[in-house]
Image (cartoon, grey):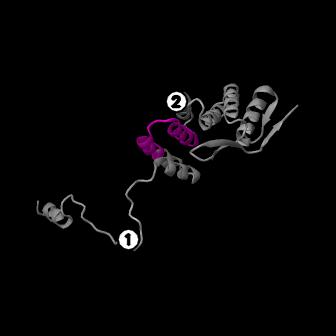
Amino acid sequence: MLTLAACQSSTHGLQNNRVGPKAPKGTPKLTEAVDGLIVGHRLMAAGEYELALRAYTRGAVDHGLNADVLSALGSANLKLGRLKQAETLLRKAVEKDPEHVPAWNNLGVVLMELNEEGEARRVFRNAYALDNGNSDQIRENLRLAIARTENTAYVVRNEDKFELVRRGNGRYLLLQTPETDIEQ
């Protein structure tokens, strides 16, 4: 009993009255938390996908489960290899906003990873049309999906490697590393 009482008196019970060193003069005081989506985008760029997923989840508290948040959550799950979770989230994103180009593109990425090339082709075609053909990366995604569905002699060497790339506002696009040959 005395030991327990001694511990409590030296730590002031469960109170956290510790005061650290003061911040340097001129340091702005933070009154608001940084947006979870912004933090998540930065963590995705740094390759910290699990932390990005947590940040996107926090961002959902502020933004709700809108298409941007669902697309970001889907992208993080894709990078973590959770393809079915990513697919579910991205399908919800395009349901909420049928004109959300990044969500369509990222859904195409998931479908390519799941070897659903036919559906991926339709999804990339939709993303390309919604983007008015402005994205070279979406055009390349569509080209790859078409090549896979039309050419039965398509051979993959060293397996295609897909990579999501941030395109502002939490949008990620598929890039393919050039390791493929097409036999005729």
Q: Are marks 1 and 2 in contact (CB under 8 Å)?
A: no
Magenta region, main secondary structure: helix
The alpha-carbon separation of the residues under discs 1 and 2 comes to 44 Å
Secondary structure beneath label 2 = helix
Residue 142 shown left or right of residue 32 in the figure: right
Residue lying at 50% horizontally and 39% vertically, measured from the top left? 69
Q: Is residue 86 left or right of residue 112?
A: left
Residue 23, disc: 1
Quarter containing the C terminus: top right
Establish if 118 lies above or below 20: above
Quarter location, residue 6? bottom left
Amino acid type, callout 1 = Ala
Magenta stretch?
Answer: 54-81
- Extreme residue in the bottom direction: 25
Indicate the position of residue 27 as horizontal and vertical percent values.
Answer: 41, 69
Examine the image and state in which quarter residue 117 appears.
top right
- Taking depth in this image into account, of 155 and 48 the one nearest to the observer is 48
Q: Does the magenta stretch include residue 71?
A: yes
Label 2 sits on what residue type?
Answer: Lys
Does 128 sit above or below residue 22? above
Residue position marked by numbered label 2 in the rendering: 96
Point out residue 149 in the picture as x, y percentages from the top left corner.
76, 27
Residue drawn at (73%, 45%) of the image: 177
The residue carrying pointer 1 sits among few (fewer than 14), some (14 to 19) or many (20 or more) residues within 10 Å by Cα, namely: few
Sooner in the amino-acid sequence: mark 1 or mark 2? 1
Q: Is 160 within the magenta? A: no
Counting other residues with Cα less than 10 Å from the Cα at mark 2, is it few (<14), some (14-19), or many (20 or more)? Answer: some
Q: What element carries label 1?
A: loop
Q: In which quarter of the image is the N terminus?
A: bottom left
Which residue occupies the foreground of this view, 175 or 125? 125
Residue 157 vs 40, above or below: the answer is above
